[in-house]
Amino acid sequence: MAGKWYELITGSLDDKKAYRRYKARIAALPEPYGTAAKAFERYLMYNGGITDGDPGVMITMLNDFADLWERAAVDQTPVADIVGDDPVEFAEAFAAAYAGKRWIDKERARLTDTIQNLDRKDEQ
Amino acid sequence: MGKQMTEMLKGTLEGIVLALIAGQPAYGYEITARLREQGFSEIAEGTVYALLVRIEQRGLVDVEKVPSEKGPPRKVYTLNARGAEVLDEFWGTWSFLAERIEQLHHRIDDAQEAGE
């Protein structure tokens, strides 16, 4: 899909708008959900590495993430019931659901190729 | 929840959730509640949510957004044909594993009894 020429430089404006809408949803969460959501967001952004892939995937993830916390806030579900015993594991499981390319995927492909090529050399 | 239980559930929770949806479409909280009814009392809602998102991304369920009185619409998950195939495969794998592990268990018990 062809965007406007300046989006090549700035990134898609639609994505930016979607991102700003997401930020507003998180900012509007009551406590303790706001603090919890921001803490997970920080981890997802830092560790997820989804940002270098399709921005659409990231927007989908963030919207689902905002849905989860808004729902929890409305139902007054305790944060512990949402994330369980291990917040890190929850964050990892959540991020893993999104098919964005992660930088580690390139390294995985490289390792797999190298080992497969070893076999081919053996056969010659 | 014990570490071993957590590890074992990790591999089977997807199948369990697919089986629960196969019976009746449901939204996230209902699925967590059904799991608790079945005795999986300590599964976090977020774990189920992340799993539902994953099976949605993989195209195993159809999702309908149903407006709720307060808050964002609830996503209702329905198993589709692709999901039903994966569920069938899960039951096949599960039966195989359960049978093999049970046999191993008995063989080792018998050996211990014989040794005593």
Image (tube, helix red, strand yellow):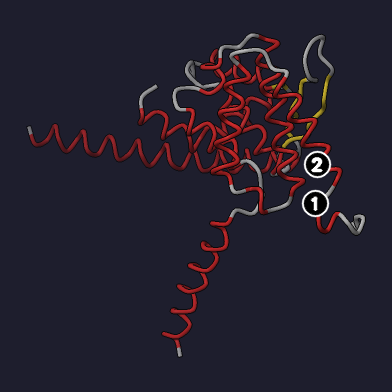
* Element assignment for label 2: helix
Instruction: State the mark number for residue A16.
Output: 2
Q: Are marks 2 and 1 on the same chain?
A: yes
Q: Is residue A16 left or right of residue B48?
A: right
Identify the residue under disc 1. A11
Q: What is the quadrant of the N terminus of chain A in the image?
A: bottom right
Among the two numbered marks 2 and 1 on one chain, the one whose residue lies closer to the N terminus: 1
The residue lying furthest to the bottom in this view is A124
Please provide percent x and percent y for residue A23: 73, 29
Q: Give the quadrant of residue B48.
A: top right
* Element assignment for label 1: loop
The residue nearer to you, when weighing B70 against A117, is: B70
The residue nearer to you, when weighing B25 against B109, is: B25
Instruction: State the mark number for residue A86.
Output: none
Picture residue at 66% right of the left edge, 53% below the top:
A52
The residue nearer to you, when weighing B53 against B110, is: B53
The residue nearer to you, when weighing A27 against B54, is: A27
Picture residue at 60% right of the left edge, 19% below the top:
B32
How busy is the neighbourhood of tag 1: few (under 14 within 10 Å), some, or many (20 plus)?
Answer: some
Please provide percent x and percent y for residue A15: 81, 43
Q: Give the quadrant of residue B62.
A: top right
How busy is the neighbourhood of tag 2: few (under 14 within 10 Å), some, or many (20 plus)?
Answer: some
The chain under label 1 reads A
Please provide percent x and percent y for residue B102: 35, 35
Q: Is residue B2 left or right of residue B11?
A: left
